[in-house]
Amino acid sequence: MKDKDNFLGKNWLLDTSESIKLHHDIAIPFRQEVGIIDTHTHHNLRQIVENKPFPNIWRAEVLETREEYKNCDHYIIQLAAKFPGFSQALARDPQISDYDKWVALCKVFPNLEGNHVHQWMHLDLKRMFGIQELLSADTAGKIWERANEDLRRKEMLPQAILKKIRAKIIFTTDDPIDDLLYHQMAKNIEGITFLPTFRPDAYYNIFDDNWKSKVERICQLTGQDTTLKGLVEALRKRHTYFTARGAKASDHGLLEPYGLKINQERVEQIFQQAYDKGEKFSLRSIETKEFISYMMHKFCEMNQDKGMVTQIHYGAIRNANEYLFKNWGTDVGGDISAESVNIVENLQPLLSRFFSGEDNNQNHLILYPMNQIFAHTNIMLERAFPKAHSGFPWWHNDSPYVMEQYLLHTAGSSLLTSSGGPVCDGRKILAEGSRFEVFDRVICKVLGKFLSIGAMSKEGAIRAVKGLMYYNQANIFNLKY
């Protein structure tokens, strides 16, 4: 059953004969048939549309600093920075060459073995470049030359890579004021559909220093007064703009999944305090909680009206490492998961209003916890509210082990056919295929386990594999198949 070299071998992650058969006989041909649906990414669509060669393997895999293509795999930098010889400062120093940064990374990279980031990187090298060697001080130069030579080929342009892995539908994450020009241009990319996702966090985060300027900008863009009513109407107009251009979902990054029922008079008071009087509210203040709750009800109203899915990613404490935030801003590896989140009390009014199952025309909600400890609560909410779904492990949780436990837990406490399905949450075009290969293997591992102990029929296991790989998301997001 085991390969001669088992690291990323033919049957890696597959630990039963049943899981091996499911993967090779069902999952691989099914993925070839239906391709990849990825309903949550941070891909730079401009980079895909302009379709220029990656300058080198460092910029393709780790850190791209050019403003128009700016991107960062903070997983890699974050972990590698734990070892002498590599650091966040080194990775971001414009005076250090990309080659020297790559060499420094390769020197410490063996220390990452056992973590899924180590597996992903080598899977990228193996699948996209045919490179079998492990990253190390000894192989850094050789892999640099080999990968960069391949990156100059037209088969390694961004669009060609996505076509090679059979990407079919990719959701991006977009600010409501985005003109979505690149989505329009992307319609010329044959075989792949790119859909915008409405991400309005900046317009309800009243604790953020930039909130007032954000409100002014969207109200000016849409011709609205800078009042609570004007802000809601401005967001509604942009929401309509997004849906007219194919958007299937809104996405919300929240510390807690706020959804309390708050009256408009109270929220107008909070708006005036924050906007007109310049009062500062903290992340966990009651005003922040009430304001975001009110806005979440408004967004769910918009989604209900337009047939869109609501996605909530909750439990992240942003910029916990003040040194990283001060020097390099957001999304550089300084975020952590909250140890305490009020889920049920905050969310129950929103769930009861929009996702109870009372009306078959209600749309769907997917909940993604930053702290996987909260997954059981999501699963219980999924059982109680027919239109709610537990999201696949995401961010720091998308390792094979955590995904396996999530699927086992979901199967026992709810339904695999109700899961929101895997999402890449990725920023790297090169890694999209690798991520989905891992998803597919873990899915087959779990369903193979059920087959091996007689807990599921063969037909049921095949149905669940295909559902988790494709049909669950196609149904939730109303995608054609």
Image (spheres, rainbow, N blue to C red):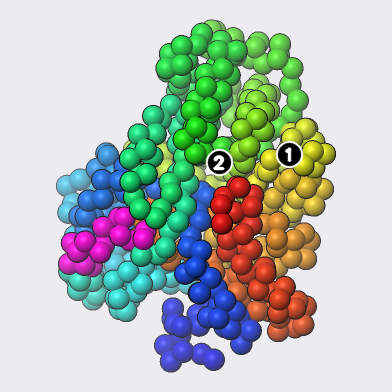
Judge from the rendering whether residue 137 lies leftward or rightward of residue 460; answer left or right. Answer: left
Q: At x 53% / y 28%, what residue is drawn?
A: 239
Is 123 in the magenta? Answer: no
Instruction: Report which residue position mark 1 lands on.
Output: 361
Q: Position of residue 159 (x, y in %)?
A: 31, 55
Between 121 and 308, the one nearer to me in the picture: 308
Between 410 and 26, the one nearer to me in the picture: 26
Q: Position of residue 481 (x, y in %)?
A: 56, 57
Q: At x 65% / y 79%, what residue is drawn?
A: 448
Is residue 353 visible in this depiction of the protein?
yes
Answer with mark 2 or mark 1, whichever residue precedes in sequence.
2
Is residue 356 visible in this depiction of the protein?
no
Q: At x 21% / y 55%, what residue is drawn?
A: 53
Which three-letter amino acid code belongs to the residue tagged 1? Asn
Instruction: Report which residue position mark 2 lands on.
Output: 248
Which three-letter amino acid code belongs to the residue tagged 2? Lys
Between 437 and 409, the one nearer to me in the picture: 437
Is 150 in the magenta? Answer: yes
Q: What is the span of residues highlighted in magenta in the rendered image?
A: 147-163
Q: Is residue 143 above or below residue 452?
A: above
Q: Main secondary structure of the magenta part?
A: helix
